[in-house]
């Protein structure tokens, strides 16, 4: 299996540390508000990575954190904690906000039919691990303390700029006027922030340096190492994490252990809505509920996400979601052919579906190429859906549909056969059509349509589908 590695800027063959296990760490959501469409694009793509690893014969061990403290509104360690901001907005405690939106996020992952990670660790449940990591960095001489917290000294880590290809001098020259002048460098980042002297935060803890809370970047290093070891196989996150969050993770982790944090880095690209960046001020932070309110299933959304490659800048629009709805309907109609075998239908080669399955697997193993996988599926739908399948091919279609569910998570195999009564109406309708009793044929067709069963006539009789 090959994956584009941000670390080397190359497509590389995955070579796990301890095969067949592949350790995967994913930067999860900061749970201060509802997840929006851009978040869901990203997390479905992480699920695709895990599914493809399984297809490739590996046993992925997936950890995705939940950020419930420490993520400030500015990546530059300025401003208010996002959980505190959410608490003020809703008139609740930060703990209540974290619980509500954390539960919502996990539920949303389930609604989108993602594989459940082995662990969903929360930052607030791993404070001691984060303190221990700071102590280790302090003992090794990588930290310093100023008025508002304990900071990592990036000048002590010569490789800091390598991962993101940063120009440190340019960043220093372009630092904002409000840049914290006590910091040694604009790239230095907070490991522990002190609570303001004039207020008590909802979330704060004692530490060797004073009462406060951990920096956002620290949690991922502490939890990745706790659950997956000093070096993990694959670290995934959004492309916007490269210059700050992931560069900081690498610095603090590798300074503490002397080992690579991850051998492969997978980054998903940005999502735009109707050609615009996702922003609350623009009102385009579309939620799962918004999608469902427009009459679309979350399986349609999932298919739409898979229509673009994870490294491309993807575009969401309601028009594109409508196109995905039609595409899914065609694929589902193909999946329902497994209930409609006919002994008089032409047979498909016994190798046909095996060959297609291998081609789809190869596409996914080649840097998660979902557009190519869906192109192959569309080809199959066009070739197979013209007639009822032969009885001997029905079981092969069933096996292939279950493979598609495993590979892409579209829940095609959850559909059921039409009812016995509907099968009887269909047989009566075929009989009426063969007898040229057109009025009766039309009446029975309309009766089935009223029940959500639609017909397409072929030489071997009608093929039914549900949309």
Image (cartoon, grey):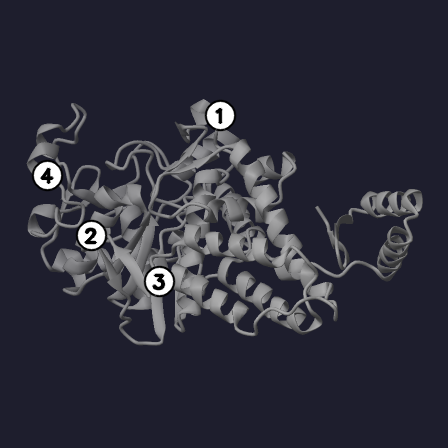
Within 10 Å of the Cα at label 1, are there few (<14), some (14-19), or many (20+) other Cα atoms? few
SS state under label 2: loop
Q: How far apart are marks 4 and 3 (CA)?
A: 29 Å
How far across and how far down the image is residue 419, in percent? 83, 59
Q: Residue at x 18, y 45 (%)?
A: 164
How far across and how far down the image is residue 187, in percent? 15, 40
Q: Distance between the residues labelled 2 and 3?
A: 19 Å
For disc 4, the marked residue is 167
Q: Distance between the residues labelled 1 and 4?
A: 35 Å
Query: Above or below — where is 302 with respect to 86?
Result: below
Select label 2 or label 3 by which is in front: 2
Would residue 394 appear left or right of 29 to someone viewing this image?
right
Residue 114 appears in view:
no
Mark closer to the chain start, 2 or 4: 2
Q: Distance between the residues labelled 1 and 3?
A: 33 Å
Query: Above or below — where is 177 with respect to 439?
Result: above
Q: Are marks 4 and 3 in contact (CB under 8 Å)?
A: no
Query: For this rendering, which residue is in front, 41 or 28?
Result: 41
SS state under label 1: loop
Mark closer to the chain start, 4 or 3: 3
Within 10 Å of the Cα at label 3, are there few (<14), some (14-19), or many (20+) other Cα atoms? many
Report how many numbered discs are placed on residues in the image: 4
Mark closer to the chain start, 1 or 2: 2
Select label 2 or label 4 by which is in front: 2
Q: Distance between the residues labelled 1 and 2?
A: 35 Å
For disc 3, the marked residue is 24
For disc 1, the marked residue is 283
Query: Above or below — where is 424 with respect to 163?
Result: below
Mark closer to the chain start, 2 or 3: 2
Q: Which residue is drawn at 28% across and 48% down?
A: 217
Select label 1 or label 2 by which is in front: 2
For disc 2, the marked residue is 9
């Amino acid at each position: 299996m090959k994956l584009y590695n941000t670390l080397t800027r190359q497509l590389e063959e995955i070579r796990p540390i301890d095969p067949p296990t592949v350790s995967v760490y994913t930067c999860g959501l900061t749970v201060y508000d509802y997840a929006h469409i851009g978040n869901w694009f990203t997390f479905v793509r992480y699920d695709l990575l895990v599914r493809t690893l399984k297809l490739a014969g590996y046993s992925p061990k997936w950890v995705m954190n939940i950020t419930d403290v420490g993520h400030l509104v500015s990546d530059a360690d300025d401003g208010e904690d996002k959980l505190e901001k959410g608490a003020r907005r809703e008139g609740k405690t930060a703990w209540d906000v974290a619980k509500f939106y954390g539960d919502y996020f996990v539920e949303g992952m389930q609604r989108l039919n993602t594989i459940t990670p082995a662990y969903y660790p929360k930052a607030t449940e791993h404070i001691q691990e984060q303190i221990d990591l700071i102590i280790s960095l302090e003992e090794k001489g990588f930290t310093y303390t100023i008025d508002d917290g304990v900071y990592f000294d990036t000048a002590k880590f010569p490789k800091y700029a390598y991962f993101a290809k940063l120009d440190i001098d340019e960043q220093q020259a372009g630092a904002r006027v409000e840049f914290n002048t006590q910091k040694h460098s604009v790239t230095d980042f907070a490991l522990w922030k002190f609570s303001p002297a004039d207020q008590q935060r909802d979330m704060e803890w004692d530490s060797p340096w004073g009462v406060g809370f951990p920096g956002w970047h620290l949690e991922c290093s502490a939890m990745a190492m706790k659950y997956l070891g000093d070096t993990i196989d694959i670290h995934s996150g959004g492309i916007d994490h490269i210059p700050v969050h992931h560069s900081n993770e690498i610095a603090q982790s590798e300074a503490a252990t002397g080992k690579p944090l991850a051998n492969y880095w997978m980054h998903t690209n940005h999502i735009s809505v109707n050609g615009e960046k996702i922003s609350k001020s623009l009102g385009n932070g579309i939620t799962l509920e918004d999608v469902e309110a427009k009459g679309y299933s979350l399986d349609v959304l999932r298919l739409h996400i898979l229509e673009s490659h994870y490294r491309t800048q993807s575009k969401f629009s309601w028009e594109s979601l409508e196109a995905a709805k039609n595409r899914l309907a065609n694929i589902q109609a193909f999946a329902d052919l497994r209930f409609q075998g006919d002994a008089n239908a032409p047979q498909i080669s016994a190798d046909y579906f095996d060959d297609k399955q291998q081609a789809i697997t190869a596409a996914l193993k080649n840097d998660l190429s979902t557009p190519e996988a869906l192109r192959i599926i569309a080809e199959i739908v066009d070739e197979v859906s013209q007639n009822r399948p032969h009885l001997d091919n029905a079981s092969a279609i069933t096996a292939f549909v279950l493979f598609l569910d495993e590979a892409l998570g579209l829940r095609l195999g959850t559909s059921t056969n039409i009812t016995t009564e509907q099968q009887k109406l269909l047989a009566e309708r075929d009989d009426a059509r063969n007898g040229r009793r057109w009025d009766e044929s039309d009446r029975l067709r309309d009766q089935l349509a009223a029940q959500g069963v639609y017909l397409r006539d072929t030489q071997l009789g009608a093929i039914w589908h549900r949309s």
